[in-house]
Amino acid sequence: MRYNGSRSQGGRLGAGNTMISEEKLKILTESAKFDVSCSSSGSKRKNEGGIGNGYAAGCCHSFTPDGRCISLLKILLSNDCIFGCKYCMSRADSDVPRATATPEEICELVIDFYKRNYIEGLFLSSAVHISPDYAMEQLLLTVKKLRTEYGFHGYIHVKGIPRADARLVREAALYADRMSYNIELPSERSLKLLAPQKSKDCLLLPMKQLRREKEIFKEEKRKGHFLPAGQTTQMIVGASPEPDGQILRLTQSLYRAAGLKRVYYSSYVPVVRDPLLPDIPTGERREHRLYQADWLLRFYGFSAEEIVEEDGNLSLELDPKCAWAMRHLGLFPVEVNRAPLETLLRVPGIGARSAYKILEARKFTRLDFVDLAKMRVVLKRARHFITANGKFCGEKNVQAIRGYLGAGEERERAVQMSMFSDTETVRSALTGEL
């Protein structure tokens, strides 16, 4: 192993004979901060004689089952880009400081930071420096060196470069835990307008190819790893005029056709000015609603078409699940002791874990509201849509229900009942006194 264990000297960080300057490090990490598609790993890569491990619980601002917070070095190999994406601070005509690191500099930095216990993994991206193939080749060289020469077995997430040779991408997938291609904009029209060097095909085809390669790798039971943590992508919300429904339909197709682990949403922030872009940021409320809707797509059996409102967008007043329930009040209330799983999952205030707990518990007893509170069902919401052992404790007036749900999201602290909650506490929760 080439690591010599030296500390930073003279404004430089790293190890051995190859160290990166603090100025270059600042430029490359600042340029990487707008990519949000790196928050968890899902990898189970084990140490095989080197240093580091990949943990299934994730590596960037995430927590392992034993409560440890995992940190990730998030950096670009280069921010010197030949592409002209209008929304990007690294675009070719943007007047920003430029920097390019060598694979050796990144490798030494990762090992040095890992040895100091600063990080446990790497998120590595790059602008399209010189050409797509050159940029992808440098990313490949970096992760290959980390694995084979430096013996690093920690988590590595690599960004794919649009229009790069498929052979380079495939080889990088043999060394990375996760890869991602950022779609950024949800329509071909917006891509042509705001990111003219990108296209739908140059982003989606590599995703589908990597999925096929992973399936073949698994079927043939080859030794080694091939993207054990899968793929993710990111979409910018608000830089282009597409409604929430179009974004969610694309998200739905990505989960189904490309097998993505996560789709991330990033509210548009005007980091660079352009007449084709809005002058004001989108705001976090819309991004938050898209994440809530995304959760419903992945875990609650909803489709994109039924989540959105008539105008094609998500309600900003109510979360998507509550908004759907309000549009379908004729389906409620449902009896928790008889309703099937797919129905329970659509009840506001009943999460996936609570739904499974209800199914298991009702095999042995008739559940009432005290039992539901102990299961941490959010009764301030759920009580308007359920009966428990024949009893209904909610409102019947539509405006009153909407008022409770809307006010609840702004002001309520979710009532988390302990296993020792008494009947009086449950009654207080039902009547809104907590």
Image (cartoon, rainbow, N blue to C red):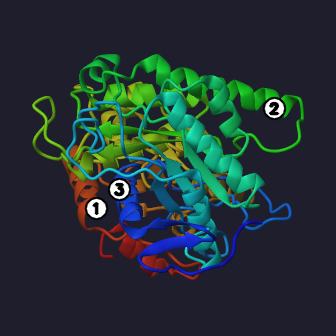
Residue named by callout 3: 394
- Residue at mark 1 to residue at mark 2: CA–CA distance: 48 Å
- Residue found 32% across the figure and 23% down from its top: 191
Q: Earlier in the sequence, mark 2 or mark 3?
A: 2
Label drawn at residue 247: none
Q: Position of residue 89 (x, y in %)?
A: 27, 45
Q: Position of residue 110 (x, y in %)?
A: 59, 64
| Amino acid type, callout 2 | Phe
Which numbered disc, 1 or 2, marks the residue that appears first in the sequence?
A: 2
Helix, strand or loop at label 2? It is: helix
Q: Which residue type does callout 1 highlight?
A: Gly
| Residue 197 in the image: above or below residue 139 | above
Contact between labelled residues 2 and 1, with CB atoms less than 8 Å apart: no
Number of other residues with Cα within 10 Å of mark 3, as a class: few under 14, some 14 to 19, many 20 or more:
many
Residue sitting at x 58%, y 49%: 157
Between the C-alphas of marks 3 and 1, the distance is 14 Å
Left or right: 259 as drawn, with respect to 27: right
| Disc 2 target residue | 217
The one of 392 and 107 positioned closer to us in this rendering: 107
Dots 3 and 1: beta carbons under 8 Å?
A: no
The single residue placed furthest to the front in the displayed view is 17
Residue 44, position in %: x, y?
75, 55
- Depth check: give the residue in front, 384 or 186: 186
Regarding residue 339, the answer to whether it shows in the image is: no
In the depicted structure, whether residue 233 falls above or below residue 252: below
Quadrant holding the N terminus: bottom right
Q: Which residue is mark 1?
A: 408
Left or right, 303 with respect to 175, comes to left
